Image (cartoon, rainbow, N blue to C red):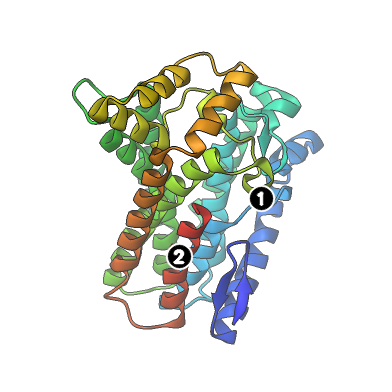
Amino acid sequence: MTVVGPFGLSVRDQALEADVQAGLTAVEEGLLEATKSEVPFITEAAQHLVRAGGKRFRPLLVMLTAQFGDPYAPGVVPSAVVVELTHLATLYHDDVMDEAAVRRGVPSANTRWGNSVAVLTGDFLFARASHILADLGPEAVRVQAEAFERLVTGQILETAGPQDGRDPVEHYLDVLSGKTGSLVAVSCRFGAMMSGADETVVDVLTQYGERLGVAFQLADDVLDIASDSHESGKTPGTDLREGIPTLPVLRLRERAARLGLAEDIALCELLDSDLSDDARHAEALAALRVHPALEQARRDTVRYAEDARAALAPLPDLDAKAALMELCDAVVHRAG
């Protein structure tokens, strides 16, 4: 078995491993080319997160799902570049909204150059993604546009919060389906679609990607609480400090409302206080790390990952299918 990428994905077939590695190398070259500008400062800012590395989770999915058709088809690598550029652009914007100081183990763009440059650099990456996308045909443009609309809608819904009477956990899972699931689903859709796979296969892989994307974000929610900055590449408890109610916090509030335990209520009150204070933030983080709500969030992550695995059942038993199933395990492993 050969290990591919930061997920430690083991590939049993040498030809598949070679295809995936060659594809990811081509994507890396494409990302550097797409982020070049005649203005050196724009190049520096646009390549800031590209050069910081990252899991390249979405391009990896494009390469694997392309195995269900012709993995060497000309649209496969450019579509992977498109989804990764789109993802990178959202990170620039997210860090501004979250006032994050660190991303992928390096200072965030907003910390280094200010919010205006970070937002405009994200816009630059969206523009470059659109330029590449235009060469992939009107169907690809439509698919990406619909996914981008869902992504932005999810972000807005997260900012607005659940309407009165709406279960906060259900609302949050809907947010994640748009905010994260949509682009992961498009990664799988593009890989299959650009390779010329059968439409039923494209649909199955799109469903898989949507569910895996939610599981991936839930694992990030757990990591934001449970990990240190070395593991996650960003400052632990960033969402907590900004008052963003990720799943562990929502599960805590749900439990406090249901059981009325004094310690749960006290922790909720601490979370509602000013967590810009380092001591309070550290206290809240430490309490959540040992709270049953964190374990509940881990179980939720496992459930979505298993749903993703189940979606693959109709597909032929290729080595790529086995690799996609193993990715479900890798996502769960990230959440501990």
Closest to the observer: 206 or 194?
A: 206
Q: Residue at x 48, y 34 (%)?
A: 288
Closest to the observer: 185 or 164?
A: 164
Residue 169 in the image: state x and y as whole percent. 29, 35
The residue sitting at the left extreme is 165
Q: Are marks 1 and 2 in contact (CB under 8 Å)?
A: no
Q: Is residue 312 left or right of residue 321?
A: left
Q: Which residue is mark 2?
A: 329
Residue 326 in the image: state x and y as whole percent. 46, 70
Secondary structure at badge 1 equals helix
Closest to the observer: 282 or 68?
A: 282
The residue sitting at the front extreme is 262
Residue 12 in the image: state x and y as whole percent. 54, 83
Q: Residue at x 42, y 62 (%)?
A: 188
Tell me the quarter of the picture where residue 48 sits. top right
Q: Is residue 287 left or right of residue 264?
A: right
Q: Amino acid at mark 2?
A: Asp
Looking at the picture, does residue 84 appear above or below residue 109?
Answer: below
Q: Residues within 10 Å of mark 2 (few under 14, many from 20)?
A: some
Q: Residues within 10 Å of mark 1 (few under 14, many from 20)?
A: many
Looking at the picture, does residue 31 appear above or below residue 125?
Answer: below
**Visible residue check, residue 133:** yes
Looking at the picture, does residue 8 appear above or below residue 160?
Answer: below
What whole-number distance in Å separates the C-alpha atoms at marks 1 and 2?
32 Å
Residue 44 in the image: state x and y as whole percent. 77, 39
Secondary structure at badge 2 equals helix
**Visible residue check, residue 144:** no
Q: Residue at x 56, y 75 (%)?
A: 10
State which tag comes first along the sequence, 1 or 2.
1
Specify the label residue 34 is tagged with: 1
